[in-house]
Image (spheres, rainbow, N blue to C red):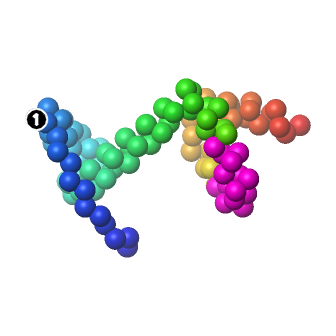
Amino acid sequence: MTEMKEIVVRVDEEEYRMIINFKKVYDAVLEAESDFNDYMRDVIKEGLDKMLSDLPPKNVNVLLKTLQAMFRENPEFVCNFIVQILKKGSHISKEEEDRIKEIRGHYIA
């Protein structure tokens, strides 16, 4: 098991009420009472994923140049990572899958 680090975050009353009350929804989806720390880790992970997924439309050139620079620096890692992501393609939405296939079509005859 990985070592857990502790982070203390101060929130205002409204944020506190939202966090505490949304846990009821989270627990209802899980159909079980969850540990508060597990709940907060999931909220943070989902929030970070959402924030990252919002980046590409505005910053696609920056991300592409970053990926290209990473590829030049460590091609094995980048290629292995891309392969893993592509293999997970069955878990993405049909719309996203169609977009990826269109992009791939430019490179694969």
Residue closest to the eye, 106 or 93? 106
Residue closest to the eye, 85 or 91? 85
Q: State which quadrant residue 77 falls in.
A: bottom right
Q: Is residue 74 visible?
A: yes
**Main SS class of the magenta portion in the image:** helix
Whole-percent x and y of residue 1? Answer: 37, 73
Residue closest to the eye, 104 or 52? 52
Q: Compared to 42, does 25 lie above or below?
A: above
Badge count? 1
Q: Is residue 79 visible?
A: no
Amino acid carrying label 1: it is Glu
Q: State which quadrant residue 81 falls in.
A: bottom right
Q: Which residues are magenta?
A: 66-83
**Left or right of residue 90, residue 35 in this image:** left
Whole-percent x and y of residue 18? Answer: 18, 35
Whole-percent x and y of residue 103? Answer: 74, 32
Q: Which residue is mark 1?
A: 13
